[in-house]
Amino acid sequence: MNIKDELIELIKKSVAESEERDFYRQPLIGFSSANDPLFKNIKNNAGLQHLYPQDILPEAKTVVSFFIPFSESVVSSNRVGDTVSIEWAESYVKTNKLINDISENMIDFLVQFGIKAATVKATHNFDEKTLTSGWSHRSAAYVAGLGKFGVNRMLITKAGSAGRYGTVIMSQEIFPDERTEEEYCLYYKNGSCLKCVKACPVDALSIDGFNRFQCYNRLLDISQQFTDIGLCDVCGKCVVSCPVAIIDK
């Protein structure tokens, strides 16, 4: 088994054997070149604060992206009303920890073969004043071919958009995966839907824009409701309302 297959197996096994495995479906994994020109596009669009893979690991050759999709029960629990379900809140906190653990395990695995690697924590890696991040896991996953963005600014994969992303950058060169041409967002596909826009409780989302400060103020309010389970600044209504929050193929 080669390094790529070993990493895929490590991620899948970690999710399947996690204590919270009922929260998840099978993860998706993609590989991109650290020198892909799209990383420059991301920096141009996201701002100068956004890093190149080489800023995180100078020897970067490959970026490994993985997506852990939530189960139907987790998604459906958060579809009712404006309140955030405890299942959705718990899945957010526990999945962030799982992603960080998986990423560290991948780094430890690669070290055995003399391969350097680095990661970016799953969340809360942003500037609280500007609400801009030094690394977008979703954008990296797009470069790795895992999906395409929808109106709700979420990456929609062949497993849907409800879930969490992780990234590991490595010094070993692995042939990159192809990017998908399939359009999953129904609005971009045929002009229909926009349920994500209608579902936003604070009208932060529109076809043409996203008010991140309006959204973040709601997340801060919600975090006060779940102080017993950790930092839980999460909503997800724009995700779970989407008809392709979950895709089973």
Image (cartoon, rainbow, N blue to C red):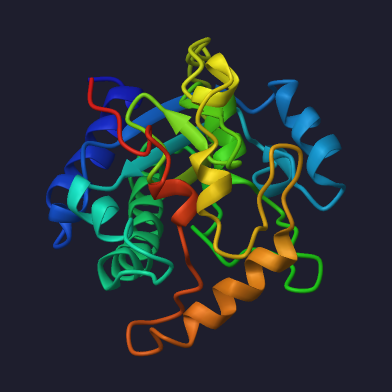
Quarter-wise, where is residue 169 in the image? top right
Q: Quadrant of the C terminus?
A: top left
Identify whether 54 is placed above or below 6.
below
User: What residue appears at the point 40 percent right and 59 percent down from the top-left corner?
Assistant: 100
Q: Looking at the rendering, in which quadrant would you find the N terminus? A: top left
Apparent side of residue 203 relative to residue 131 in the rendered image (left or right): left
Report x, y in % for residue 129: 80, 73
Residue 164 visible in image: no
> Which residue is depicted at the point 36% across and 24% down?
158
Snapshot quadrant of residue 89: bottom left
Residue 90 coordinates in the image, percent (x, y): 30, 70
Judge by depth and name the residue closer to the eye, 118 or 27: 27
Q: Is residue 187 left or right of residue 71?
A: right
Relative height, residue 146 to residue 218 (above, below) = above
Q: Position of residue 214 (x, y in %)?
A: 70, 67
Write the residue at 54% across / 16% down.
Answer: 189
Q: Is residue 248 visible?
A: yes
Residue drawn 45% across the image and 56% down it = 237
Q: Position of residue 226 (x, y in %)?
A: 38, 84
